[in-house]
Amino acid sequence: MKTTLDYTQIAELISKAKYPIAFTGAGISVESGIPPFRGQGGLWNKYDPEFLTLSTFHRQPEKSWAIIKEIFYDHWGEAAPNPAHYALAELEKMGMMKAIITMNIDNLHQKAGSSKVIEYHGTIGRMICEKCHKTYPTETVNLDKIPPRCSCGAVLKPDFIFFGEGIPNDAFNESLDLAQKTDLMLVIGTTGEVMPACHVPIIAEERGATIIEINPSESTYTHSTTDIYIPQKAGIALAEIAKEAKKFSK
């Protein structure tokens, strides 16, 4: 593992990569005011995660939905992309970012302008009916009365992963394919502890990809998987990288 803050060097590495991608975790969204689930200030220090188990949701949808609305729609709905999200979108425009695999469900990468985003854990931007499988863009669903219901009468569920659910096959398979295809991966704002998503950078590294980690604190990847470690906030580091990348833009 190397340590460097030479953003020009990092930008040049990205510009020379054949298939650079990013893997993002909660840390990138913390800078937009969205708290992480774990650790200091994490949601699980304030809320019992039981409300996000499928069994509780099915048994007590009103109770689960009251907390879901408060956290993910009343508060998170006001969050805006930060410089890190915009920098990744800018790298994509320059042809230096082929895709983003995100563990986040907040839709901020898309709001910033990134077009190829694999949502590993789903999204708050869509609702799904577990009975008839109809989906609804969140902005079309009235949350003044909860739980919201499908046209078929069944309770709608946010289209993100609850405890007790598996990773969607499409997201899982596409993430695996990208991890095997990439030759350079930016790993941003993750502790590397969330299963099974944490395997994605490891697979990329095992296939020979250069792993560039951007994290204020060391993660489980730092001394085992990471090639270049940037101990900095994502918004600062990625903004500098995107600025330097313009020198190498074709």
Image (cartoon, rainbow, N blue to C red):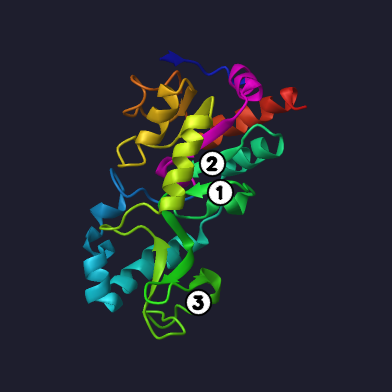
Q: Which residue is mark 3?
A: 141
Viewer-nearest of labels 1 and 2? 2
Q: x, y percentage for residue 112?
A: 61, 49
Which of disc 3 and disc 2 is earlier in sequence?
2
Q: Earlier in the sequence, mark 1 or mark 2?
A: 2
For image coordinates 36% across by 52% down, the residue present is 167
Side of 29 relative to 112 (left or right): left
Distance CA(mark 1)–CA(mark 3)? 22 Å
> Compared to 72, does 104 lie above or below?
above
Q: Between disc 1 and disc 3, whose residue precedes? A: 1
Would residue 36 be found to the left or right of residue 114 on screen? left
Label 2 element class: strand
Q: Is residue 226 visible?
A: yes
Disc 1 packing (10 Å; few <14; some 14–19; many ≥20): many
Is residue 60 in the magenta section?
Answer: no
- Give left or right: position of 108 versus 158: right
Cα distance in 3D space between marks 1 and 2? 8 Å
Question: Residue at label 1?
Answer: 109
Whole-Å distance between the Cαs marked 2 and 3? 27 Å
